[in-house]
Amino acid sequence: MKILESPELKELVTFVPNRKEPIHNWYWYKEGFSRAMVDYALDLFNAQADSVVLDPFCGVGTTLLACKQRGISSIGFDVNPLALLVSRAKTADYNPEELAVAVKDALTWRLPLPNALPGDAYLRKAFSKINLGMVCAYREKVASIGDDKVRNFLSLALIDAATKCSWTVKDGALLRIERKPVPPFGKMFKYKIRKMLHDLKKSPLPFAPVKAEQADARSLPLEDNSVDLVITSPPYLNKIEYSRMYKLELSLFFGLPPTQLRSFVGTRVDEGIEAAYWTDIGKVLSELYRVCKSGAKVCWVVGGGCFPDHVVAVDEETAKLAESVGFRATDILIARHSWCTARRTIKVGPLRESAVILEK
């Protein structure tokens, strides 16, 4: 196995480049990687038109959408209903004329405020009364739409507009409330659906089968030897903000209570943070080995683990674990370096973010 410095991946392993990518930028997801990272892996693996690409932690669908843009079939799974809705909205095969009619209709909506606002104290702190009322009114209107694709399209716009019209601020690993000037919700929603429709007209998507479903990566609903390539990024060790950062969206649109799920793959278990993480990752890698065809390649983007008294070279440990289930670890491509700190100022040790390359 070769460990190589790959500074060309420094920005690609982040979501930042997607800011400038139509459709990819419909919803900001700081935990994701970029379209360019997927393209890099597809080129590295010499992906073919008949390849089947899997992302068992598909997030908001960057792998799925990037594959679709190249006419390659893809399958994605996630346990987060918010992420799945975004993935489906970004990768759907829309009828342009029908969608344009739906958007034109939505632009005429003049909805009355509901008689009562949600009782959730957090939501009341996160919005002005008018914006919260408007979000709830539009939420009910969108939910009544029968066409799944149109409903998902407008739901994504609704969710993104709501976050932009709230007083919540995603600041690093913190979600805080800051009473700042925000736009009126109705105006932001209508701007968003116009932009999304414009993106689809400007960057029409070729047909390629895409499946985005809710499933636990430790038990994939796939047949043995059915996948050619895997491009993914699992939860990082000892990161707890994955669900906490999306508290507003999960509470308001999915009725889910806020949690602080650590970066275990599925539900939390009581065997210690590191032990639980590696137990789950081992199960995921075993599942990937089962569903991958002989000769299949895996690009596994992951960062180091940071604890108050030590750091974990997650890329090397992942490579060792992958080899224990049957994969051959060929390369670790180091994308970026950083430091693990305790109490913000005490340096515990160096960290790195890497792409681990595996082959069955």
Image (tube, helix red, strand yellow):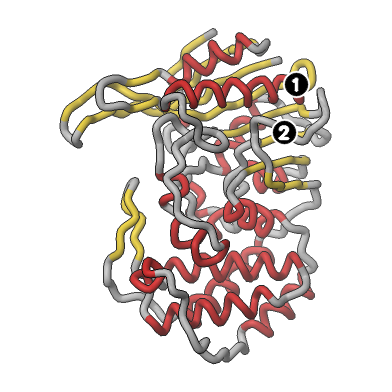
| Viewer-side residue, 259 vs 159 | 259
* Residue located beneath label 2 in the image: 220
Q: Position of residue 195 (x, y in %)?
A: 57, 70
- Residue at image point 46% right, 21% down: 275
On screen, residue 105 above or below 15 = below
**Residue 305 drawn above or below residue 146:** above
Which class describes the residues within 10 Å of circle 1: few (<14), some (14-19), or many (20+)? many
Relative to 138, say whether 170 is above or below: above
Q: Which residue type carries mark 1?
A: Arg
Residue at (77, 29) in percent of width and height? 227
* Classed neighbour count for the residue bearing mark 2: other residues with Cα under 10 Å, few (<14), some (14–19), many (≥20): some
Q: Please tell me in which quadrant of the rendered image residue 292 appears.
A: top right
Q: Secondary structure at mark 2?
A: loop
Q: Which residue is mark 1?
A: 290
Residue 300 position (above or below residue 142):
above
Going from the N terminus, do you reach mark 2 or mark 1 first? 2
Tell me the quarter of the picture where residue 267 sits. Answer: top right
Q: Residue flagged by tag 2: what amino acid is it?
A: Leu
Q: Residue at x 42, y 45 (%)?
A: 260
Percent coordinates x, y for residue 114 in the rendering: 52, 87
